[in-house]
Amino acid sequence: MSTPTHTSAPAPAGVLNLHGLSVDGVNQCVHCGLCLAYCPTFSELGTEMDSPRGRIFTIKSLAEGRMSLTDSVAQHLSLCLDCRACETVCPAGVPYGRLIEAAKVEIERQQPGALPRRLFRWLNFGLLLGHPRLLRLAAAGARLYQTSGLQQLVRRSGLVKLLPGTLPAWEALLPSVPSKAERTPPPRTTLADGPRRARVAMLTGCIQAVVFGAHNRATARVLARNGCDVLVPEGQRCCGALNAHGGDHARALAMARQTIDAFEAVAADFVIVNVSGCGAHMKAYGHLLADDPAYAERAKRFAATVRDLAEFLAQEPLRGPLQPVTMTCTYHDPCHVVHGQKIKSEPRRLLAQIPGLRLVELPESDWCCGSAGIYNLTQPEMATRLLHRKVGHVLETSAEAVVTANPGCILQIQAGLGAHQSPVRVLHLVEILDRAYGGGE
Ligand code: SF4
Ligand code: SF4
């Protein structure tokens, strides 16, 4: 088995430069096909080009210059969810997530699209995600749009359909922005309740901070009840996960460096993350910044301290007393928790400790719901197919709530259940834990 090596020279047009991986990483695939049955896009389409094995072959052919990056080839690669289910089952250890992210960087470099698309990407990846103040302003604007009645008017009048490109899909999926009070961040410091277990620093995130501020405040409370001094580092911004998944490599690097700077300043024992995509991405900073002499070692050290919230809490029994939460729940595994971080039993072990809570298993609980970062906006057709599949399974369980751990999954599954007029709620794991501690605001 060959070791991935680093490449940096720009590839000729049409040839794939695997940013950070040589073609050797691709050669680890032994074409056994074990991954095929676990790949959502292969399951839906049944085509080899839309399977992990087919995509690896495509990436290898592109990197070796034996295939050109035509629109059709780019579409087969872009249709990949980057869910990494194939990585979990691969006996040969193919670093599939890194390969597809490298491929997406090259697709963006070689096929940046027309001016409106490039402007839209810059607005989101370059401006809003990198500047929390601007993101907060945009959230306030979106709140006004939603509460003033303008959104209803735009939707009813059909004006939204006149928007270019994927903008109508973006508008349809615009999350409901809570009031300013509900967007309040957690305190800079929350002291441990009882004997101190650790000093932790919390990522508050970008979209998470403006749409699910309540989850962040609940996270601080639950960690404090479990013996943590909880710090919220000033100067933290987006971790860069959305940029990396969207093929915006240069900004993803800058955001990773900035995140490391902000968290190093508080010198915590662990960095706690309640958003699955961010946690998986931050654990990969060591690889991402391996070629940066100023950050390579710091990135490795930083990555070793990152913990998903459930992963951290499940290391010890939850500290009591815990109040009953009488409810039947099912659990949806976010891809970047279960495949990206290999965390499966931990959230279930936490839920099992809550009195009154009954957990029923969700069929295909570890299959992508179609959210996948911004996938539901860029590939709405496949995202909708996968969402219908997920919602069908949820309804089979007769659970009152779906518990999960990622804002994208929450919004996506909520939208799917809403389309079925289902009363089933979608909750973040930390909301249940907080309720068991008598939290809530
Ligand atoms: S990451 Fe997911 S969608 Fe992409 S090839 Fe692997 S299993 Fe299929
Ligand atoms: S399971 Fe791994 S080695 Fe086998 S075809 Fe899939 S990626 Fe290749």
Image (cartoon, helix red, strand yellow):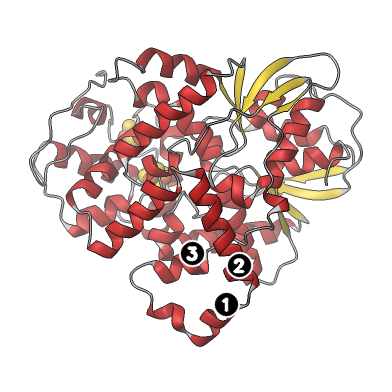
Which quadrant: the N terminus? Answer: top left
Mark 3 vs 2: CB contact within 8 A: no
Is the residue marked by circle 2 packed among few (<14), some (14-19), or many (20+) residues within 10 Å? some
3 or 2: mark nearer the eye: 2
The residue shown at (61%, 69%) is 146
Q: Which sits earlier in the primary sequence, circle 2 or circle 1? A: 2
In this rendered view, identify the residue nearer to me: 103 or 80.
103
Judge from the rendering whether residue 27 lies leftward or rightward of residue 401; answer left or right.
left
Q: Quadrant of residue 252?
A: top left
Q: Position of residue 216 (x, y in %)?
A: 68, 40
Q: To which residue does mark 2 refer?
A: 144
Left or right of 128, for residue 79: left
User: Would you name the residue on which mark 1 appears?
Assistant: 150
Residue that appears at 77% across and 37% down: 351
Please state which amino acid type lies under the numbered disc 1.
Answer: Leu
Q: Amino acid at mark 3?
A: Thr
Picture coordinates of residue 56 (x, y %)? 26, 39
Task: Give the alpha-carbon distance from disc 3 to disc 2, as whole Å.
Answer: 28 Å
